[in-house]
Amino acid sequence: MGWKKWMFLTVPLLLLVVGLIILVNLHKLLVLEQQPKKADAILVLSGGKGEREAEAAKLYHEGWSDTIIVTGALVGWETYTSEIMTEHLIELDVSTDDIHSFKEVTSTREEAELSIPLLRQLNVDTLLLVTNKYHSARAKWIFQKTLKDENVEVISVPVREDVYDRNWWKDHETRKQGASEVLKFIWELLRL
């Protein structure tokens, strides 16, 4: 067998094997779960179906912080996710006085950038960042990069009950989340 024929057969096979290894282990790149510690605030990123607020309320009731910040993306006519998230947190026995919010975000990057004035106002030095697991590594990376001049320590505490493991590619919804997150990560890298 000539080297050209050998290359023609082995290169695609090698690419397939490498692709499968990446596919099965992609969750390790997307998920960043850190141990919570006492913090000045818990920041809940917009999105999800209520599980993010539920996780923030658990952290709040466990005593990790007495301040929760929610971000607001427009979801309908003059309705923002921050309003919906605030109502949910109140139902979860979080004091209204301990909830802070801001609006007009359309991306994780904007959530990080627009959080700065409120973080300064609240004198936040340590921040627990709550989102879904598939979004946690990119979210922390963006917040760390954005807040580096603010000297805010960002700790990634994704939803504990969220499952995003090596079988992520077997479910339609988690496949969409993974593909979307990889593309968003690449986009953020290109924006450096």
Image (tube, rainbow, N blue to C red):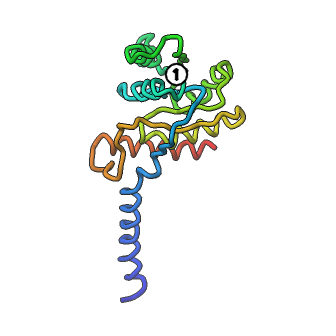
Q: Position of residue 150 (x, y in %)?
A: 70, 32
Q: Which residue is mark 1?
A: 68
- Relative horizontal placement of residue 147, taking residue 28 as reference (left or right): right
Foreground of the two, 16 or 99: 99
Q: Is residue 186 above or below residue 59?
A: below
On the image, which quarter does residue 86 sit in? Answer: top left
Q: Residue at x 54, y 16 (%)?
A: 100
Q: Position of residue 186 (x, y in %)?
A: 52, 47
Q: Residue at x 47, y 21 (%)?
A: 73
On the image, which quarter does residue 115 sit in? Answer: top right
Q: Position of residue 79 (x, y in %)?
A: 43, 13
Looking at the rendering, in which quadrant would you find the N terminus? bottom left
Residue type at the position of mark 1: Ile
Question: Would you call the spot at circle 1 few (<14 residues within 10 Å), some (14-19), or many (20 or more)?
Answer: many
Looking at the rendering, in which quadrant would you find the C terminus? top right
Foreground of the two, 1 or 189: 189
Q: Residue at x 37, y 14 (%)?
A: 91
Q: Is residue 162 above or below residue 166?
A: above
